[in-house]
Amino acid sequence: GQNIDQPTEMTATEGAIVQINCTYQTSGFNGLFWYQQHAGEAPTFLSYNVLDGLEEKGRFSSFLSRSKGYSYLLLKELQMKDSASYLCAASDSNYQLIWGAGTKLIIKP
Amino acid sequence: IAGITQAPTSQILAAGRRMTLRCTQDMRHNAMYWYRQDLGLGLRLIHYSNTAGTTGKGEVPDGYSVSRANTDDFPLTLASAVPSQTSVYFCASSDLGSGGENEQFFGPGTRLTVL
C-alpha cells in the first residue's frame, strides 16, 4: 500500500534548528513535496525534491533519498511565525499526492 | 488575480440535505482536486479531474460527486449529507504534465458541519 509517516508533533526553541523527517512508500514516485499549514489556513507549497540530495531555499532546506524512501525538512533560525503544521506528500505514478498527517511544530521563546 | 476561491467559507447543514461546495480557479490549470482534512489525518483525496470533461475517484469518494464542465470550475456535491462528512474541504489545482514541479495550489477551504 501507499503510506507516509512523519512525527505528530515537535517542539523547538526560537533561533534554533529543527529537522522534520518523513518516510514514504508509494506505487511509483514522481517527487516529494513539503507544505506549510498555519492553523485555520490552507496548505502552502514550500519545497519539491525529485532527485537525491539537498535543496536549499533561504532558511528552509529539504533533503531526499529515493533509495531509502526518506526525506527531511530542515528549518534554521527558527522564528515564532514558523509555528505551523508541516505536511509531507509523495507524488505517485499517476502524479497523485499521497499525504502524511502532518507534523505540528511548536516554537517556544 | 484571486488564484483559487471557494464558497461558502463555512456552512452548518442538516443531515439529509443536499449541498454543493464551489471552487473556481483563474490560473488555467488543467488539474483540480477536492480533499477533506480531519484532525489527526492527512489530506484525503475525494475526487480529482486531470482535464475539463474528465473526473476520477480518489481515496474517499463515497457520498460525493463532482463535475468539470470547464477549466475553471470544479463543484463538489454532497447528495444527502451525513454527520461523518463534517470536515474542512479544500479545493486545489495544478498544472499537470507541464514538466515542472506540478505543485498544487490550495483554496482557502470550506468548513462544513453536518448535524
Image: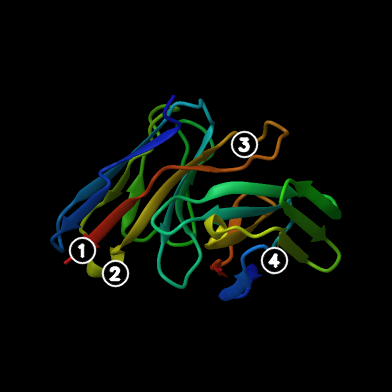
| Callout 4 crowding tier (Cα within 10 Å): few <14, some 14–19, many ≥20 | few
Do callouts 1 and 2 point to residues on the same chain? Answer: yes
Residue named by callout 4 = A16
Q: Give the Cα distance between marks 1 and 2.
A: 8 Å
Residue A103 is situated, as x and y percent measured from the top left of the image, at 57, 68
Looking at the rendered structure, the kind of residue marked 1 is: Val
Q: Is residue B81 left or right of residue A97?
A: left
Looking at the rendered structure, the kind of residue marked 3 is: Leu
Residue named by callout 2 = B84
| Callout 2 crowding tier (Cα within 10 Å): few <14, some 14–19, many ≥20 | few
Looking at the rendered structure, the kind of residue marked 2 is: Ser
Q: Chain of mark 4?
A: A
Which badge, 1 or 3, comes first in the chain's sequence?
3
Do callouts 1 and 3 point to residues on the same chain? Answer: yes
Q: Is residue A70 left or right of residue B36?
A: right
Do callouts 3 and 4 point to residues on the same chain? Answer: no
Q: Chain of mark 3?
A: B
Q: Is residue B51 above or below residue B59?
A: above
Looking at the rendered structure, the kind of residue marked 4 is: Ala
Q: Is the C-beta separation of discs 3 and 4 under 8 Å?
A: no
Q: Give the Cα distance between marks 3 and 4.
A: 37 Å
- Quarter of the image with the N terminus of chain A is bottom right
Residue at left offset 60%, top offset 74%: A10
Q: Is residue B93 above or below residue A102?
A: above
Q: Secondary structure at mark 3?
A: loop
Check residue B114 in the rendering and tell me which mark sits there, or answer none: 1
Q: Chain of mark 1?
A: B
Residue placed most toward the observer, B24 or A40: A40
Residue at left offset 74%, top offset 57%: A28
Residue at left offset 64%, top offset 60%: A78
Quarter residue A21 falls in: bottom right
Residue A33 is situated, as x and y percent measured from the top left of the image, at 66, 52
